[in-house]
Image (cartoon, rainbow, N blue to C red):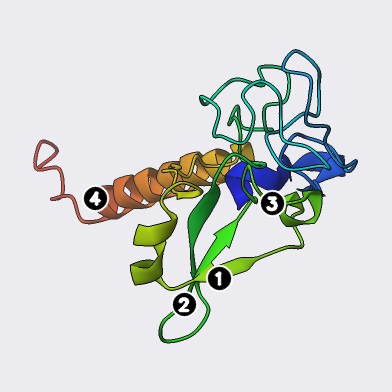
Amino acid sequence: YKAAYYKGGGMSAGYWDYPTQSDTVPGNNNFSGTNEANFFDDDYTVPPTGATTNTGSFLDSEGAYGTFDMAGNVWEWNDAVIDTTDRGVRGGAWNTGNTSLSSSNRGQLTPQYSESLDFNVGFRLASSIPEPSGVLLIIVTGLVILGWNRQRRDSHAAPDDHGA
């Protein structure tokens, strides 16, 4: 979810409505335009008609973290546990309408059921990269620990016998 919709930190922190870095519904017929995705909008994305596209087909419609095609193409599993049998999916697919692309839309499927839906359900692996403020916190914490260890070591050092 974060890899698809998050805007980033700072003054503009928050989430986009669509994973194309936009709060406007994407289009579905221009591979070289911004804010475009593979989904059904009175017609299928062309070309191809009614099928998945290769990741990166919409080069100018990437997400804030450089992810591609997280709007439409295929529903993507996420780590949401909906109930004892269903898990969360987001992003819509090539055969769903634009409402399924929105960050406010969450679908659910039973994992066993997805075997029959493999034409429009997939997954993506995303690694958590620390925010700059998180990296700064790690560095400061490390320096504090080093200083504390040095002070502790110095206070427990053996007395100097050279002056006796």
Quadrant housing residue 18 = top right
Q: What is the number of the mark on residue 108?
A: 1
Q: Amino acid at mark 4?
A: Arg
User: Alpha carbon of mark 4 to alpha carbon of mark 3: how far?
Assistant: 64 Å
Residue 86's tag is 2
Q: Earlier in the sequence, mark 1 or mark 2?
A: 2
- Using the image, tell me which numbered label, if any, was put on residue 153: 4
Cα separation between marks 2 and 3: 20 Å
Q: Secondary structure at mark 3?
A: loop
Question: Which residue is at the front of the view, 163 or 60?
Answer: 60
At numbered mark 4, what does the secondary structure look like: helix, strand or loop? helix
Q: Residue at x 84, y 37 (%)?
A: 22
Residue sitting farthest toward the top: 32
Please, what is the three-letter code of the amino acid marked with disc 1?
Gln
Question: Of marks 4 and 2, which one's residue comes earlier in the chain?
Answer: 2
131 left or right, relative to 86: right
Q: Amino acid at mark 3?
A: Thr
Q: Are the residues flagged by discs 4 and 1 in contact, CB closer than 8 Å?
A: no
The vertical placement of 77 against 162, above or below, is below
Marks 1/2 in contact by CB < 8 Å: the verdict is: yes
Query: Which mark is first along the chain, 3 or 4?
Result: 3
Please give the name of the residue rendered at 75% of the width and 13% of the height, measured from the top-left corner.
Answer: 32
Q: Which residue is mark 3?
A: 96
Above or below, 94 against 30 in this view is below
Q: 9 or 28, which lies in front?
A: 28
Is label 1 in a helix, a strand or a loop?
strand
Q: Earlier in the sequence, mark 2 or mark 3?
A: 2
Quarter of the picture containing the C terminus is top left
Label 3 neighbourhood size at 10 Å, few (<14), some (14-19), many (20+)? many
